[in-house]
Amino acid sequence: MENIVIKEVPDSPYYPAVNFNAEKGICEIKGESYMEETFKFYSPLLDWIVRYTKEVKKPLAFNFKLTYFNTNSSRLILDILDILKKYQDNNGAVTVVWYYDPEDPDMIDEIEDFEMETGIKIHLVEFE
Amino acid sequence: MNINNTNGNKIISFHGPLTISLLSFISNYLKLIISTDQVLMSRLYKIFVELTQNVSYYSAEVKEVEKGINSGIGWFILYEHQDYFIFTTGNLIKKKDATKLIKNCTEINSLKEEDLRILKRKTRTQAKIRDIGAHIGLIQTGLLSSNTLDFKISEIDSKHSYFTLSVKLDK
């Protein structure tokens, strides 16, 4: 299964960097997310996660390092977490970690909301 | 709050097509020119992006900025006062959307923080994957500002109204 690598581009900071690695079973989304065509950006990422859970079926560590996402992006992040929860409910080994800035109290609320909506445990780690 | 409040220091204003490149540039520019604490700046930044993107996506007046790519036309103004910021946006809307917009804003203004969070979760879960709608952006703005949304809708003609939204962010 191929990996997905999208690097950060300074001219378009509204796209996050993405690194989905099937061999290592590690996914990372980093930066900010407030692009116009949200579904177009996230759709291949959702497809990749579904394929991983059906074909690779190995442990998956998902690391969010998003410092900002708009409400449109939050809908697609919710979809990612729903897929991960479904995998977990079917005995897939999933760890979700959210790296956050302690100076941003609103992010904690966002993460709590995601946990309540999906039922998946999100581990909080402060940015160093 | 007076929606036409022009006292205070005008930080920035713009009227035209609100493209993602423009919004991204200005939102990051604001981080450079406004001296305030990190939490407040973060909230101002998030409110700026949500509300200007609402104008960009849902304005009834659009312009083709690149071949096949339309951007909504509207305006925004940011004022800084001694104890607060006021951010205002304005754009044309379809008259048929006015009633729903009034209902949504009125509901948001009637709710306390925890109930707003419940409404946000419910709205997000029920939203279609491709179009989450303007409602959740307004809910998020209410949560971030901890103040009511000061909105005004004026009839323009048989098909259009004008929507103005002003948000106060206390320092």
Image: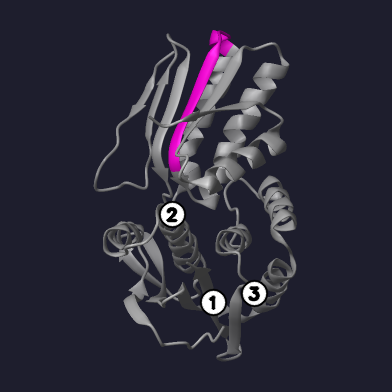
Q: Is label 2 in a helix, a strand or a loop?
A: helix
Q: Are marks 1 and 3 on the same chain?
A: yes
- Magenta residues span A55-67
Where in the figure is residue B166, as x and y percent of width and height? Answer: 52, 77
The structure residue drawn at horizontal position 51% and vertical position 69%, both measured from the top left corner, is B170
**Nearer-N-terminus badge (1/3):** 3
Q: Is residue B10 magenta?
A: no
Badge 1 crowding class, 10 Å Cα cut-off, few under 14, some 14 to 19, many 20 or more, is some
Q: Is residue A59 magenta?
A: yes
Badge 3 crowding class, 10 Å Cα cut-off, few under 14, some 14 to 19, many 20 or more, is few
Query: Could you tell me if residue B159 is visible in this image?
Result: no
Where in the figure is residue A47, as x and y percent of width and height? Answer: 53, 27
Q: From the viewer's perspective, is residue A49 above or below residue B43?
A: above
Q: What is the chief secondary structure element of the magenta stretch?
A: strand
- Residue type at numbered disc 1: Leu
**Nearer-N-terminus badge (1/2):** 2
Where in the figure is residue B94, as x and y percent of width and height? Answer: 58, 77
* Res B158 → quadrant: bottom right
Query: Could you tell me if residue B72 is visible in this image?
Result: yes
Q: Is residue B163 left or right of residue B40?
A: right
Circle 2 chain:
B
- Residue type at numbered disc 3: Asp
Badge 2 crowding class, 10 Å Cα cut-off, few under 14, some 14 to 19, many 20 or more, is many
Q: Which residue is mark 2?
A: B42
Q: Is B21 or A119 nearer to us in this picture?
A: A119
Q: Which residue is mark 3?
A: B97
**Nearer-N-terminus badge (2/3):** 2
Circle 3 chain:
B
Q: Mark number for residue B165?
A: 1
Circle 1 chain:
B
The structure residue drawn at horizontal position 59% and vertical position 44%, both measured from the top left corner, is A110
Q: From the viewer's perspective, is residue A53 above or below residue B51?
A: above
